[in-house]
Amino acid sequence: MTFSTWILSISGVVLLGVLIDIILPEGQTNRYLKSVFAFFVIFTVISPLPKLLNSDFSLYDFLDTEEVSIDISFISQINVQKLNALKNDIQTELNNSGYSGIYINITADIYSENMQIERIYADLANLVIDKNIANINSNKYEVVKKIITQQTGVEEGIITVYG
């Protein structure tokens, strides 16, 4: 890197900083972006120093990694949230259909990127059927299984209704 290139990169970073400061509104996000931007300004300013000291220095040695790994804890948290949302959706639909008090349990591999539902259990032990249902004598197990299938899109074979 020549001296003129170094000066141009510093002035370019400063102009970019002014532009970011003008465009972004005040607040929490602006403070964080300014901090990240300050980090890049420091690296831009000190990048030619190792060459002046006759050493091999590359910013890519610090930032470039060959490995990209998946954060399994993040994936599992997201999948647990998806399962809880699905469970709430099922229970809401069951309540809207006149079947309340049903406990839903969903098992899945939450550590997989492409989570697949393994089993869905519906416990009807505390079932309360609304008196306004047209056919109260219908098979409650089949009705609940049908509602769960419609809500989740899974096969009826992985749904277990008991109680």
Image (cartoon, rainbow, N blue to C red):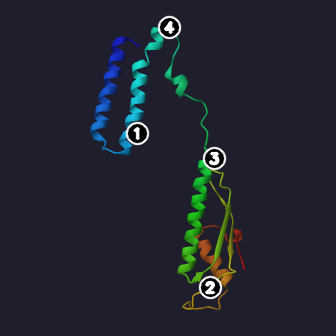
Mark 2 residue element: strand
Q: Gap in Å between the C-alphas at discs 4 and 1?
A: 34 Å
Seen in the image, is 21 located left or right of residue 36?
A: left
Foreground of the two, 140 or 105: 105
| Cβ–Cβ under 8 Å for marks 4 and 1 | no
Q: Which residue is mark 3?
A: 72
Q: Name which of mark 1 and mark 2 comes first in the sequence.
A: 1
Under circle 3, the secondary element is helix
Q: Is residue 127 above or below residue 112?
A: below
Type of the residue with mark 4: Asn
Q: Amino acid at mark 3?
A: Ile
**Disc 1 target residue:** 32
Which residue corresponds to mark 2? Answer: 128
Amino acid tagged 1? Tyr
The earlier-in-sequence mark between 3 and 4 is: 4
Q: Position of residue 152 (x, y in %)?
A: 59, 68
Disc number lying in front (4 or 1): 1
Characterize the local packing of mark 1: few (<14), some (14-19) or many (20 or more) Cα atoms within 10 angstroms. few
Q: Which mark is residue 54?
A: 4
**Mark 1 → mark 2, Cα distance in angstroms:** 52 Å
